[in-house]
Image (cartoon, rainbow, N blue to C red):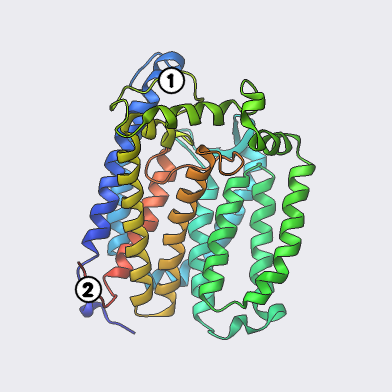
Amino acid sequence: MTSNTSKKPFDFLLFMTVLILLCLGTIMVFSAGAPHANNKMNDTYYFIKKQLLYLPVALFALFVTMNIDYRKLGKWSPVFLIGSIVLLALVPVIGTAHNGAQRWIDLKVTEFQPSEIAKLAVILFFSYSLSKNKNKLNSFFTGLLPYLLILAVFGGLLLLEPHLSGTIIIFGVACVILFAAGAKIWHFSLLSIPAIAGLIALVIFSPYRRDRLVSFLNPFADKSGDGYQVVQSLYAIGSGGLFGRGLGKSMQKFLYIPEPYNDFIFSILAEELGFIGVLAVLLLFLVFIWRGVKIAINAPDAFGSLVAIGITSLIAIQVIINIAVVTSSMPVTGMPLPLFSYGGTSLVFLMSGIGILLNISRYSNYDRI
């Protein structure tokens, strides 16, 4: 095991990429949210003030986790996992609802989504457990099945809220970790059959999901109903052109796109900064993924490698799905854009995860440029 004396500098390129994305995201929260804040809260600065309150907390979380030996977190991962399950179980009992979904617990001073804790808990527990036995996943029933049962518990609790996007993220990240740890491809192939059947059932027996699928196939057929958000998003992206309308000059954020500072913030970014701005942001996310994979490959142990790939995939999956949704490449689901979408507590937990990734980089042996 690598000792503390062998610490190296953290990955500066990854660190700077995160800070640039965070700065751009904060600017876009203000730009995209100002009209809605003025109309609904009678305060143009409502969303940016709340986001700026959480920003130092998120940076503090980043620096704390960046300087705590990540290996210590592995021993606590079962506690994190059980704690996140308990919190998710409490949501239907004491949780608060917004826009028809009961996903938050009110702490009086703030609200938070237990699903944000669950994401990190699953990454840490799966990585720690799988790193203890490299051949664990050779068997389906004694190896892979226990992890699938854990995922079933999380999936059931999240779908009660309902929180389909959170379920997709956790399942997606868990599958990446399992695959990286040595899960058999044919096991995943067999599992795809009941998984697809379950997804179809979720759509068929849920009217609002069924309506979303129908509107996805042709959003312009009901552009004032279920296809409204996607149509307005496409208008925003299309009108951005090559260089955009200019920062702060979006038209679709003026009460056309509902909550443009959240899941559809990428549409406003495309409208204001154009193709060039979108390309720059995507390149920054690609740099993040590149450095994350590099850290995972060069991590000093299996636990660090699996955690690094888990946190990297957490960002990558959310970026891919968010952009797919706003460009009408997949049905609408509430997927935030990491480091951009409005949300204080989600930002804090996301930065905590990035801090863990940077900490792993301090023990990894690779070129820092």
For the question of whether residue 302 can be seen, the reply is: yes
The extreme front residue here reads 242
Residue 36 got which mark?
A: 1
Position of residue 210 measured from the top left corner of the image (x, y, whole percent):
73, 38
Name the one closer to the observer, 113 or 11.
11
Q: Residues within 10 Å of mark 2 (few under 14, many from 20)?
A: few
Looking at the image, do the residues carrying marks 2 and 1 touch, with CB atoms under 8 Å apart? Answer: no
For residue 97, which quarter of the picture? Answer: top right
Q: Relative to 187, is 105 above or below?
A: above
Kindly identify the amino acid type of the residue bearing the numbered disc 1.
His
Residue of label 2: 367
Position of residue 75 measured from the top left corner of the image (x, y, whole percent):
46, 72
Q: Which quadrant, please, contains the C terminus?
A: bottom left
Position of residue 336 measured from the top left corner of the image (x, y, whole percent):
48, 42
Tell me the CA gap for discs 2 and 1: 46 Å
The residue depicted at 47 percent of the width and 43 percent of the height is 323
Q: Relative to 55, is 197 above or below?
A: below
Q: Circle 1 sits in a helix, a strand or a loop, which is it? A: helix
The residue depicted at 75 percent of the width and 50 percent of the height is 200
Position of residue 69 measured from the top left corner of the image (x, y, whole percent):
32, 70
Residue 2 got which mark?
A: none
Q: Is residue 53 left or right of residue 110?
A: left
